[in-house]
Image: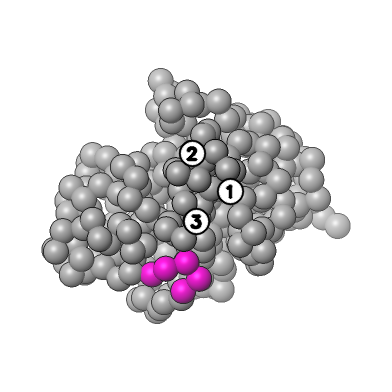
Amino acid sequence: MTTRRTFIASGLALGTTTILPAGLVAQEDGTHRFETADGPVIVHPIHHASFVIEAPRTVIYVDPVGDPALYEDLPEPDLILITHEHGDHFEPETLQAISAGKTQILTNHATYDLMSPELQAVSQRIANGETMNLLGIDFEAIPAHNTSEDRLDFHPPGRDNGYVFGIGGRRFYVAGDTEGTEEMRALEEIFVAFVPMNLPYTMAAEAAAEAVAAFAPSYVFPYHYRGADGGTQDPERFAELLAETDAETEVRMGAWYAPDEL
């Protein structure tokens, strides 16, 4: 088996993983490039839970919040995915500011109910387990919720969405705010995954590594790892733990936070 090292943001090498097609390298501008049958997909980390996926035919914004200026140098969104209504994932003012005339929104039902009529007019609702085709892309809503008894009030079962969708023959998974659910662990053939780890709202680095090892994506971004806990969950520790498993997964580190937030 040909192997390559798993690199993290600090440049340290942790574990090994099966080599994948060439051209899958982090760019100097902080973006990450992944090759698909349709051409390159560029991931633009923005902040915390917000990022942009720039695909050859479609630009997808995920949970965009914050100053609209964060997005002004990026292509306009064809589609916005919203996982749930918490303020670090759903900000109506930002949605209004960054949406173009072509922009569609895919969201869970609870967030849709909080939207203005203007936003509802360009939005589609999808519930856990449902599928929908938008802009020629198949989306599946994956359950996103807490499983620990003392955390169920944060993200109760049945309300929030993660998303799996295909681009150029590759499957992408956005977990949203969740612990390692049975549905997450049962995922197959995921190319790039985005998985949260902060307490008490999602899960610890140890639990995240265990869950990711179960479905073994080719690549994983730890994200959503700062918050009310003061950043107790270390993404480099997550990478170390994942490297100790049999999962052939490469950990990618996005520039999610400014230096004074680390």
Query: What whole-number distance in Å separates the C-alpha atoms at marks 3 and 1?
Result: 8 Å
Q: Is residue 135 magenta?
A: no
Marks 2 and 1: CB-CB under 8 Å? no
Q: Which mark is residue 147?
A: 1
Q: Amino acid at mark 2?
A: Tyr
Query: What whole-number distance in Å separates the C-alpha atoms at marks 2 and 1?
Result: 11 Å
The front one of 67 and 126 is 126
Q: Which mark is residue 157?
A: 3
- Majority secondary structure of magenta residues: loop
Say above or below: 168 vs 194. below
What is the crowding at mark 2: few (fewer than 14 residues within 10 Å), some, or many (at least 20)? many
Task: Give the mark nearer the N terminus: 3 vs 1.
Answer: 1
Residue shown at 38%/69% (left/top)?
Answer: 126
Residue shown at 30%/57% (left/top)?
Answer: 111
List the residue tagged with mark 2: 201
Q: Which stretch appears magenta?
A: 126-130
Q: Amino acid at mark 1?
A: Thr
Residue shown at 73%/37% (left/top)?
Answer: 241
Circle 1 SS class: loop
Measured as percent of width and height from the top left, residue 147 is found at 58, 48
Say above or below: 56 vs 247. below
